[in-house]
Image: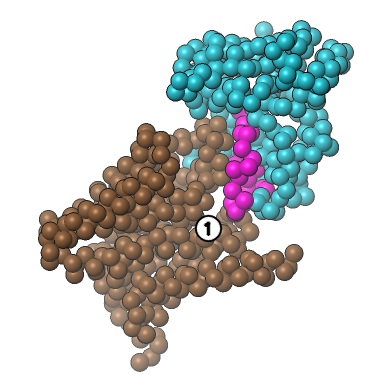
Chain colours: A cyan, B brown
Amino acid sequence: MSIEIVSAKELCFRYNSTEVLSGVSFSIKKGDYLAIVGPNGSGKTTLIKIILGFLEPTAGGVYLFGCAPSKFGNWEKIGYLPQKLASLNPHFPATVREVVALGLLSRKGFPKRIGLHDQEAIDYALSLMDIAHIKDEFIGELSGGQQQRVLIAKALVGDPELLILDEPTTALDPEGRDRFFSTLQKLNSEKKLTIIIITHDIGTIGRYASRLLYLDKRVVFYGGFDDFCISKEMTDYFGEFSQHIICHRHDHGHA
Amino acid sequence: MDMLDIFSHGFIQRALITGFFIAVLCSTLGVFLVLRNLSLIGDGLAHVTFGGVALGLFFQTYPIYVALPVVLLSSLGILKLKEKAGIFGDTAIGIISSLGIAIGILIASIAGGLNIDLFSYLFGNILAINKGEMATSIIMSIALMAVIYILYQELVYISFDEESAMASGIKVDRINTLLCLMTALTVVLAMKAVGILLVTALLILPSVSAIQIAKSFTMTLVLSNVLGILSVIMGIIISFFINLPTGATIVLVNFIFFVFALFYKNIIRSAGR
């Protein structure tokens, strides 16, 4: 039986009087690759923050590796890339290597220290994201795409079981984006890495993800791509990409 | 007088030793405050110290005994205002610091005769530090540096990105509280060296200068320490020979370092690319 990595049951969240999430239920198992899509303000990032325990749900519950996030302690199992690349302090005086090394802290006991024996993991993450050649550069002096790859390497360096990415491809060029998705797919298929990705890259994601969650404050669709059909309320969001999603569904089915 | 004779004076030795420890502490803590956009918390807490010192003088106790708990509580007050009232950090600092200044002025005005003593705390005098104060400064500096050393990686991660740090299991709220409390203690310690009005400079300037020129985080911390220590030593020596106020001289030396750092970053390093 597959291990349940994340499950949400009738999850609700209100911010003051505004309803952000209502009755959200889904579960993902080890090796799943879940794409969360939906219009702006549909509650995608809020859902991730509840899963990680940053926000308390107003009602319902969420479980991370079978644990409530407030009681969860195995943070080394999680790699996380937040949404806000724009808020990265451009004057933060750290090299690429120093930033990537931070991703190893969840594996460390007290007091947390990064040592020489961690270099192998750091070098692997750097090469995985194709940034080994800029390892001694300042993070603030890199382009947006390079910074994004550094942050993804930081999320991957601890060899997590669950990778949560919030709009990771916004700063990547088309070539970088394709390479990134291929890398993720490789990790997903070879290492059974469970992935949750929030993306607006709806023209591409159908080629890689195994499950889709369309969120618009509530779950409009949740399931595999084989079962996916675009309902009336999704038409505006998918627009011209509707055909891509359906085509990729078939690609996926034959993969 | 021989140049080296300066080091034979007991008060100079005490000033240099105390200044060394306070400089290391301020310049280390300052890096984290600057990177977290919390530079003004030192200034705000220094203003609160003014109120605390005035309160201590009013009750005729050793002012630091009163200033210390007042500043510690105020640092927690700033955090709570930020969290519970949902206001920005700089606004919370502004509210608490103006309250501190207002209380200080009111007490000084009511008591009348406090002004001379209060002025000595406002402008500080590292050359007047006695053995007891020196020992307290050394012990406290070592204790606070030990806490920073133990939590070093967590502090770096939180300074870089709080959200990612939380997702790696770091108790961000606890470390933020600790950082505020450590800043409060540091402000009270450094007050005697450079005075309430100039404490912020000792926290911010070495770190900002180091950030301009360093090429890694480790190098930033080392450079910040070196610049902090150099500014204190040079400030004490220069002020002794030219007969200037020591606190202000230390800050001016720091500012000159900052100008050099900016020059290096914008002219020399840019030209090298």
Residue at coordinates 30% horizontally, 52% vertically from top-left?
B98
Question: Disc 1 marks which amino acid?
Answer: Leu
* Residue matched to label 1: B221
Towards the viewer: B54 or A2: B54
User: Residue B16, image x and y in percent?
Assistant: 36, 72
Q: Label 1 neighbourhood size at 10 Å, few (<14), some (14-19), many (20+)?
A: many
Residue at coordinates 43% horizontally, 76% vertically from top-left?
B234
- Let me know if residue A63 appears in the view: no
B225 displayed left or right of A186 = left
In the rendered image, the vertical position of residue A227 relative to residue B213, given as above or below: above
Residue at coordinates 55% horizontally, 62% vertically from top-left?
B210
Give, as a single range, the part of the protein colored magenta: A78-103
Residue at coordinates 54% horizontally, 70% vertically from top-left?
B259
Towards the viewer: A191 or A69: A69
User: Residue B149, image x and y in percent?
Assistant: 46, 50
User: Residue B32, image x and y in percent?
Assistant: 48, 51
In the rendered image, the vertical position of residue A31 relative to residue B264, given as above or below: above
Which quadrant, please, contains the C terminus of chain B? bottom right
Q: Quadrant of residue B55?
A: bottom left
User: Residue A20, image x and y in percent?
Assistant: 54, 20
